[in-house]
Structure formats: structure tokens, C-alpha cells
Image: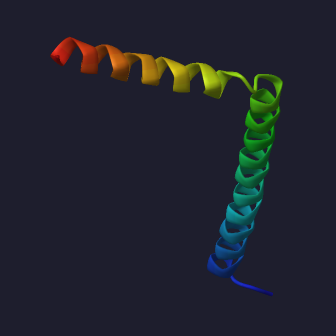
Amino acid sequence: MPDKKAKDKLDATIQQVVEHRALEAVRKSRMEERRRWRQKDPLRGLFWGLLLVLLGVLFFANEQ
């Protein structure tokens, strides 16, 4: 029969594996949610890009 230290170590290892798998599932779920969100709004990047270009033009025009 295994001693208590070995059993505790095995239980701790199993718990770490379970926690790791749960964290991986959460990460995968979050990544999938972000991907779906980006697909819903493809013009969001275009908006920010145009805003940055406009700000650059304004700063450039303001210097001259």
C-alpha cells in the first residue's frame, strides 16, 4: 500500500493536470469568442486605420 506522501503527491499532480486542462479549455473558448467577434465587425480595423491616417494628416498639416 502506498504511503501517504506518495498518495498526496499523486493527488496534487492529478489536480494540476485537471486545472491545466480547464485553463486550456477557457483559453480556447476565449480565442474562439474573440475570433467570432472580429468576424462580426470586419470594418472595425478599417475605422481605426482611417482614424490614424486622419490624425497623422492633421499633425503633419499642423506642423506646416
> In the image, residue 60 lies at what x, y percent?
26, 21
Q: Nearer the viewer, residue 31 or 63?
A: 63
**Relative to 50, 31 lies left or right:** right
Q: Position of residue 38 (x, y in %)?
A: 75, 31
The extreme bottom residue here reads: 1
Vertical order, 61 against 22 (above or below) = above
Residue shown at the point (72%, 68%) measured from the top left = 11
Q: Residue shown at 17%/17% (left/top)?
A: 63
In the rendered view, tell whether residue 29 sits above or below residue 18. Answer: above
Extreme left residue here?
Answer: 63
In this picture, residue 39 sits left or right of residue 13: right
Residue 30 occupies which quadrant of the picture? Answer: top right
Q: Count of labels shown? A: 0
The N terminus: image quadrant = bottom right
Residue 14 sits in which quadrant?
A: bottom right
Q: Position of residue 53 (x, y in %)?
A: 44, 24
Nearer the observer, 21 or 36: 36
Up-down: is 10 above or below 27? below
| Colour convention of the picture | rainbow
Which residue is nearer to you in this view: 59 or 41?
A: 59
Q: Quadrant of residue 43?
A: top right
Q: Position of residue 34 (x, y in %)?
A: 73, 34
Residue furthest front as drawn: 64
Q: Nearer the viewer, residue 4 or 22?
A: 22
The quadrant of the rendering that contains the C terminus is top left
Task: Residue at 76%, 51% (x, y): give it.
Answer: 22
